[in-house]
Image: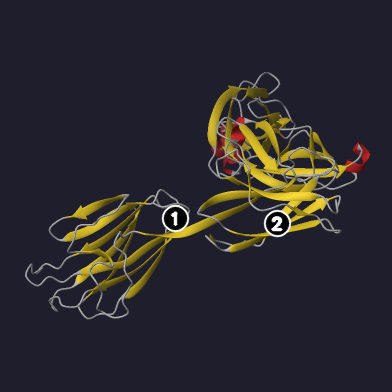
């Protein structure tokens, strides 16, 4: 063996000559990214990246990088583009139109020679837009309702909005005061909104619409709109009505005038729900020295009414209405045309309710009848709030026969009660039927139903509390 070959072998064994692993060791890289930090909803953003070698910061040119994006509330990345770097190691990509805030990053996946690397996560904030386009009036009396209308960018459809107001006689005076939320509303399906409010202060009211924002949608504020609120003939109204008001129940309405207008005549008027006609509800009264007028009336009939005071004398001859007080009056209506007193024991008259042994009679219902089922479906039309009855089995039937009782609300919510037998005491039933369109009262007969000695089930004295007869 020659000397040179021997030395070569020793050099290899001693590690002086690079190993195969050292020859294939990958070179480190770094990937950075920058983005358009803020765009308007519907606009596009630019994602720019640069890939360099480490150390030395030499550009890694003509390599492919991956642009990824995800909604801010998500943890899953979605690849939206693959682009190549130029001779300076740079690449850029224009996104599709954006509607909500997103996070983005750029990846270089590496090669046999270079290691992979990833940029830091960059967020693109998508600015949402609100704009007030008009008000129902430019000048009002304090306390009169005003409608503020506007538009929003498409991603805000269905989102909650706040209508805020601040008052002042000048722009500087208003700017010195904080905004206060006076009403709320939603952005409609067409991207528009209309929010009603009844500001009580005097001077110039400045309105704006506000979206508080969410994790994926940025907060937004609209431009402002001004409405002048007059000192004269403003009347606020309150009522003593709390919850459901029965027909015949007395309700006290108090009007507060600003300014006080002591001695000025005012009348209480009402407007039926859905109507545009105002009708006098009571004889005229006058404001006292503190600016208060009080009227107490009995609710005349079922229905939803808006009440307001009207100045009927003094310097103004126009109809001036305050912020409205809505009072819903209700009455009890029987679901049985042959209503009789409900018994207190197992002995009840078959004419005191809806029974399993007879055909039902009345308005607004459909009979439910089969070999084992008796019942009736009542069309309440969403006008009622409460149902009351007593369920029972009449005495005199077969003691081995039981009756089942079921109430169904709009064919969705089914309430099944325990069976009753002859001799069982009646059980009072109360159901919340607010907004219910159809109420079904069902009696299930026993399998051994005896036509000669039938057991009779009954929904005794069924009644509903409604604004109008069902």
Q: Which mark is residue 94?
A: none
In front of the other: 228 or 281: 281
Instruction: Find residue 97 and report its image quarter.
Output: top right
Disc with the residue nearer the chain's start (2 vs 1):
2
Q: Is residue 415 left or right of residue 149?
A: left
- Residue at 15% across, 72% down: 455
Image check: 226 left or right of 412? right
Disc 2 element: strand
Quadrant position of residue 227: top right
Of the pair 412 and 335, the residue shown nearer to us? 335
Can residue 42 be seen here? The reply is yes
Asked if the residue under mark 1 is in contact with the one under mark 2, i.e. CB atoms within 8 Å, the reply is no
Q: Identify the image quadrant of residue 312.
A: top right
Percent x, y of residue 403: 20, 70
Position in image of residue 166 (x %, y %): 82, 44
Residue located beneath label 2 in the image: 238
Residue 421 lies, in percent from the top left, at 21, 76
Neighbour tally class for label 2: few under 14, some 14-19, many 20 plus, Cα within 10 Å: some
Q: Measured along the vertical axis of the image, is residue 432 above or below residue 137?
A: below
Residue 289 or residue 258, whichever sits in front = 289
Provide residue 344's location: percent of width, then percent of height.
32, 79
- Give me the residue at 91% from left, 40% from top: 169
> Quick one: SS at disc 1?
strand
Residue named by callout 1: 384
Judge by depth and name the residue closer to the eye, 91 or 339. 339
Q: Residue at x 62, y 20 (%)?
A: 62
Q: How is the image coloured?
A: secondary structure
Asked if residue 23 shows in the view, the reply is: no
Q: Seen from this angle, which residue lies furthest top?
A: 87
Image mark count: 2
Position of residue 141 relative to residue 344, above or below, is above
């Amino acid at each position: 063996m020659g000397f040179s070959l021997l030395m070569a072998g020793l050099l290899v064994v001693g590690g002086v000559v690079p190993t195969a692993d050292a020859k294939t060791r990958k070179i480190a890289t770094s990937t950075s990214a920058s983005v358009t930090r803020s765009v308007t909803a519907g606009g596009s953003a630019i994602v720019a990246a640069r890939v360099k070698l480490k150390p030395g910061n030499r550009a890694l040119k003509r390599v492919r990088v991956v642009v990824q994006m995800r909604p801010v509330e998500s943890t899953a990345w979605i690849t939206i583009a693959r682009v190549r770097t130029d001779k300076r190691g740079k690449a850029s990509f224009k996104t599709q139109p954006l509607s909500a805030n997103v996070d983005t990053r750029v990846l270089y996946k590496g090669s046999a020679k270079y290691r992979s690397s990833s940029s830091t996560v960059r967020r693109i904030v998508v600015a949402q837009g609100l704009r007030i386009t008009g008000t129902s009036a430019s000048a009002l009396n304090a306390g009169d309702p005003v409608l503020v209308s506007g538009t929003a960018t498409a991603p805000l459809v269905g989102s909650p909005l706040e209508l805020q107001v601040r008052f002042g006689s000048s722009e500087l005076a208003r700017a010195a005061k904080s905004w206060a939320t006076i009403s709320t509303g939603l952005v409609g399906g067409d991207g528009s909104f209309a929010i009603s409010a009844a500001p009580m202060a005097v001077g110039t009211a400045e309105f704006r619409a506000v979206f508080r924002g969410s994790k994926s949608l940025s907060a937004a504020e609209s431009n402002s709109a001004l409405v002048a609120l007059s000192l004269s003939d403003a009347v606020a109204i309150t009522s003593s009505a709390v919850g459901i008001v029965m027909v015949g129940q007395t309700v006290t309405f108090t009007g507060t005038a600003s300014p006080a207008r002591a001695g000025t005549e005012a009348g209480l008027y009402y407007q039926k729900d859905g109507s545009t006609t105002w009708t006098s509800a009571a004889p005229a009264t006058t404001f006292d020295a503190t600016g208060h007028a009080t009227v107490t009336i009995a609710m005349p009939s079922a229905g939803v009414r808006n009440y307001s005071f009207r100045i009927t004398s003094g310097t103004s001859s126009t109809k001036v209405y305050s912020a409205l007080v809505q009072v819903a009056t209700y009455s009890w209506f029987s679901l049985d045309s042959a209503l009789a007193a409900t018994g207190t024991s197992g002995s009840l008259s078959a004419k005191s309710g809806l029974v399993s042994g007879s055909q039902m009679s009345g308005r607004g219902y459909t009979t439910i009848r089969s070999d084992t089922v008796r019942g009736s479906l009542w069309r309440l039309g969403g006008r009622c709030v409460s149902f009351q009855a007593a369920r029972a089995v009449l005495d005199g039937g077969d003691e081995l026969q039981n009756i089942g009782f079921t109430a169904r609300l709009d064919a969705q919510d089914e309430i099944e009660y325990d069976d009753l037998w002859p001799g069982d005491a009646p059980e009072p039933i109360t159901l919340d039927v607010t907004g219910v369109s159809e109420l079904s009262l069902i009696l299930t007969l026993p399998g051994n139903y005896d036509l000669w000695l039938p057991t009779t089930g009954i929904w005794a004295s069924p009644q509903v509390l409604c604004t109008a007869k069902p």
